[in-house]
């Protein structure tokens, strides 16, 4: 009898230990094998788009979920990555010594100096990571170094998104203005109109998402990840212990910006456009909203939220364009008020509720709500 | 020199608009720490109030609307506070997202009630035109907004510093626990603070009808700048908000004049980030022993 119980325990603990990898492999198979086989090219392209948003969501999960930094300017980093990629694609298309089509239309005669190095594929790929990374790192050093945090940080990032979009629109000859950059035909040898090549592109997006997910998990599980959570839950205590919270936050913020940049760079060939309308205050908030719905405290929740929410948005607004805003607003209020841990946390919440009903002591839950001292002080 | 003088009234009027839209936030954000993204939609509610009143008040609608909009927006704020925000005290980041959900709904309500296209509110005849001194032009409508901002600031100052209710409000802001121990009904003070803060947004919204069209997206144009004013001015500091609004307004108008509008926003943002290096908590800081 006792041995039986021991065996059962061993199975149970193995199940717990292997649950993560098993789910990961299952999802990977689903995305890489089942989805391309089952979905029409149109739907597959949409899924690729959702996966791009999921890549950006990973970063938000890290910065906001683990680090407590509500970043409302992810659109900026998404855009920096996206424009870096789009500039290269435009130049590659125009051919050596030629101008991209939109510049010809708006009367620009010589290629702006900023554009020139983007002819090199390696430079463009580097910039996809470097531009958002460096921007976020510098901003983080300045802002976190002076202990600006909580709601202040959120407002500043939001203002950054607003300013960035206005700047983009204003620089017609440099960035394509309101129209943004569009009409891409090929992506590193892939023909974007060809169905097979679209499938390859989709797989690239899915693989990048998988790799980044694993990398971010590694970050969260490392000493740095623990420090980050500690900063979220008690920044002052971390400082008293001799660490520098500003640096920890800056690094996490930078990583989140890089993931947004990569997402933007992949978004460009998948969707075929990058424009200010995709990057402003509202789209940036929507990135965060998706993560909140999925569950901000886990990376898996962030990814799930991005896919679910964007799927919901597409399907719902196909039928009732006006109703979507009501639904989105209500959903958001409901999630913030009743399910702060998102879809992924709902199962746990229900379990606790049932346990509490039965009169058993509810299992200890990590309290997600934390008073941000900085905002109230 | 002439260009410098010419930009001055423009800067002042941008500043006055910023101040007007940010004043309500010095209550809700400054006093209570609630990041209310729906504040922009309260501006919109005020503007639409003026639009609605046009049908019987005609061209004087703007004047009639000022007190009415205060109550309309104030009531909306009160309902929001009672039903949702009350549950979120101490979680400022969650309130930010929550109220954004509210703002989405309110925008769509406005779209369904009044239609998506912008509408116009006709200004009273005595506000049409402008004054001119030696080449410097200032439209009457802008002067009215400036005056409205000044009146609001004086009224708020009087309320906060000279009335019993206002002093209670300050006490709750400075130390909630101690205020509660001293017999102040803090939750009632919260309601009142939120009512006034939201009502001020309504008043500001009426003012905005004088300088532009009214549409469902009205609030989104102003909300980010309004929060920046409060951040730069210092939380809950009336004089900070006044100074920050005018400095940002002037900065905006001069940068816009010397380069272009798209760069002005970037410069203003950079200046604020730079400024926060010197004074991370804004222009004026309430001294306390709290950890910063």
Image (spheres, rainbow, N blue to C red):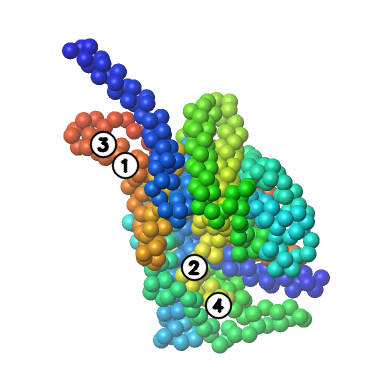
Judge the density around disc 2: few (<14), some (14-19), many (≥20) Cα neighbours within 10 Å. some
Cα gap from disc 2 to disc 3, whole angstroms: 42 Å
Per the image, label 3 sits on a secondary structure element best described as helix
Q: Would you name the residue on which mark 1 appears?
A: A346
Judge the density around disc 3: few (<14), some (14-19), many (≥20) Cα neighbours within 10 Å. few
Residue B201 lies, with reference to residue A2, above or below; the image says below
Which image quadrant: the C terminus of chain B?
A: top right
Q: Would you name the residue on which mark 2 appears?
A: B217
Host chain of mark 3: A
Q: Are marks 1 and 3 in contact (CB under 8 Å)?
A: no
Reading the chain from its start, which is encountered first: label 1 or label 3?
Answer: 1
Cα gap from disc 1 to disc 4, whole angstroms: 48 Å
The residue sitting at 68% across, 64% down in the picture is A102
Residue A247 lies, with reference to residue A311, above or below; the image says above
Left/right of residue B243 with respect to residue A322 in the rendered view: right
Q: Would you name the residue on which mark 4 appears?
A: B210
């Amino acid at each position: 009898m006792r041995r039986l119980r021991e065996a059962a325990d061993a199975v149970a603990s193995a199940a717990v230990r292997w649950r993560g990898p098993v789910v990961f492999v299952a999802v990977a198979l689903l995305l890489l094998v089942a989805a391309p086989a089952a979905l029409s090219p149109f739907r597959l392209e949409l899924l690729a788009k959702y996966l791009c948003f999921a890549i950006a969501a990973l970063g938000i999960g890290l910065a906001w979920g683990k680090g407590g930094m509500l970043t409302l300017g992810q659109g900026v980093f998404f855009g920096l990555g996206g424009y870096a990629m789009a500039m290269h694609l435009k130049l590659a298309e125009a051919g050596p010594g030629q101008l991209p089509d939109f510049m010809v239309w708006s009367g620009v005669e010589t290629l702006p100096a900023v554009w020139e190095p983007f002819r090199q594929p390696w430079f463009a790929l580097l910039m996809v990571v470097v531009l958002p990374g460096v921007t976020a790192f510098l901003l983080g050093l300045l802002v976190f170094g002076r202990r600006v945090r909580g709601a202040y940080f959120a407002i500043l990032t939001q203002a950054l998104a607003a300013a960035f979009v206005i700047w983009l629109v204003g620089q017609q000859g440099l960035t394509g203005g309101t129209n943004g950059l569009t009409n891409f035909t090929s992506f590193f040898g892939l023909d974007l109109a060809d169905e097979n090549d679209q499938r390859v592109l989709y797989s690239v997006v899915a693989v990048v998402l998988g790799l980044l997910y694993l990398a971010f998990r590694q970050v969260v599980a490392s000493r740095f990840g623990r420090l980050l959570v500690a900063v979220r839950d008690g920044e002052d205590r971390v400082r008293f212990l001799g660490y520098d919270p500003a640096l920890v936050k800056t690094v996490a913020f930078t990583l989140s910006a890089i993931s947004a940049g990569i997402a933007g760079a992949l978004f460009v060939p998948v969707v075929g456009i990058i424009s200010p309308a995709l990057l402003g205050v509202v789209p940036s908030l929507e990135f965060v909203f998706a993560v909140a719905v999925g569950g901000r405290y886990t990376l898996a929740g962030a990814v799930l939220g991005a896919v679910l929410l964007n799927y919901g948005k597409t399907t719902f607004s196909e039928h009732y364009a006006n109703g979507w805003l009501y639904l989105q607003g209500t959903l958001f209020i409901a999630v913030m008020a009743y399910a702060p841990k998102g879809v992924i946390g709902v199962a746990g919440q229900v379990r606790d509720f049932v346990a509490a009903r039965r009169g058993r002591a509810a299992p200890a839950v990590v309290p997600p709500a934390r008073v941000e001292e900085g905002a109230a002080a | 020199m002439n260009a410098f003088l010419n930009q001055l009234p423009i800067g002042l009027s941008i500043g006055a608009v910023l101040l007007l839209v940010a004043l309500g936030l010095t209550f809700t954000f400054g006093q209570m720490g609630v990041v209310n993204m729906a504040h922009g939609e309260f501006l919109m509610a005020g503007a639409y109030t003026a639009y609605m009143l046009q049908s019987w008040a005609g061209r004087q609608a703007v004047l009639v609307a000022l007190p009415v909009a205060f109550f309309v927006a104030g009531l909306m704020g009160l309902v929001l506070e009672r039903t949702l925000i009350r549950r979120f005290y101490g979680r400022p980041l969650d309130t930010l997202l929550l109220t954004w959900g509210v703002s989405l709904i309110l925008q769509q309500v406005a779209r369904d009630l009044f239609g998506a296209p912008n509408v116009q509110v006709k200004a009273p005849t005595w506000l049409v035109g402008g004054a001119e001194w030696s080449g410097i032009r200032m439209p009457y409508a802008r002067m009215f907004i400036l005056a409205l901002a000044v009146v609001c600031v004086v009224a708020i100052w009087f309320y906060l510093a000279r009335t019993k209710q206002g002093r209670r409000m300050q006490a709750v802001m400075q130390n909630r626990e101690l205020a509660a121990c001293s017999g102040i009904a803090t939750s009632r003070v919260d309601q009142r603070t939120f009512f006034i803060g939201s009502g001020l947004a309504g008043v500001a919204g009426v003012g905005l009808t004088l300088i532009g069209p009214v549409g469902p997206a009205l609030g989104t144009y102003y909300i980010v700048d309004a929060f920046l004013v409060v951040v730069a001015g210092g939380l809950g500091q009336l004089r900070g908000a006044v100074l920050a609004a005018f400095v940002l307004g002037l900065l905006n108008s001069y940068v816009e004049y010397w380069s272009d509008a798209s760069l002005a926003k970037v410069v203003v943002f950079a200046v604020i980030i730079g400024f926060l290096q010197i004074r991370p908590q804004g222009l004026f800081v309430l001294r306390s022993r709290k950890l910063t």
